[in-house]
């Protein structure tokens, strides 16, 4: 499903964290973004990577259990009837058992357009690996 966001990792460590989200030009295709590369936070790719890195830093096992949510009704409660995924929330609370620390990972996908993402694509820092 193209209208979703997934946080996953291909390898252990922060350099393995990836975000998969709809492409700028075609919401029916997906792009895979390497979140270890410098991205502007004020883009859909940037805020998605910031969110995925936050989940990873707080102990999410993104290799074995990718975290996916539907962008179809971003910020609404409930589940997408087409994909069965929960709708993406603006904020997700995390808790680290090892330290007892809690914080909130922010996904502000609604605030940013794709316009600055074009510059990142043009610079070669974004790899588009998936399509549907």
Image (cartoon, rainbow, N blue to C red):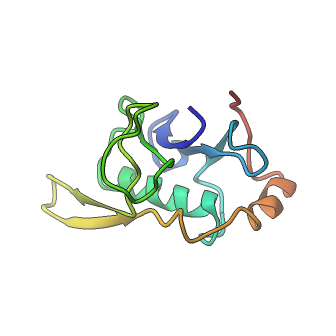
Residue in view at x 79 percent, y 48 percent: 25
Which percent across, then down, holds residue 56? Answer: 38, 50
Q: Which of these two is toward me, 58 or 129?
A: 129
Quadrant containing the N terminus is top right
Left or right for 115, reference 79: right
Q: Which of these two is toward me, 12 or 81?
A: 81
Which percent across, then down, holds residue 115? Answer: 77, 66
Left or right for 102, reference 59: left
Is 110 rendered above or below residue 72?
below
Residue in view at x 80 percent, y 54 percent: 121
* Image-quadrant location for residue 75: bottom left
* Image-quadrant location for residue 112: bottom right
Q: Which of these two is toward me, 4 or 54?
A: 4
Left or right for 111, reference 127: left
Residue in view at x 71 percent, y 33 percent: 129
Residue in view at x 50 percent, y 61 percent: 50
């Amino acid at each position: 499903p193209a209208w979703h966001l997934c946080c996953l990792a291909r390898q252990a460590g922060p350099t393995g964290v990836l975000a998969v989200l709809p492409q700028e030009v075609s919401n029916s295709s997906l792009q895979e973004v390497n979140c270890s590369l410098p991205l502007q936070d004020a883009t859909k790719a940037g805020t998605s990577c910031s969110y995925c890195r936050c989940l990873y830093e707080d102990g999410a096992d993104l290799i074995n259990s990718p975290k996916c949510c539907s962008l179809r009704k971003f910020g609404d409660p409930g589940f997408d009837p087409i994909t069965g995924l929960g709708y993406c929330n603006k904020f997700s609370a995390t808790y680290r058992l090892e330290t007892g620390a809690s914080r909130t990972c922010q996904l502000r996908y609604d605030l940013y357009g794709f316009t600055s993402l074009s510059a990142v694509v043009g610079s070669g820092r974004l790899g588009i690996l998936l399509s549907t």
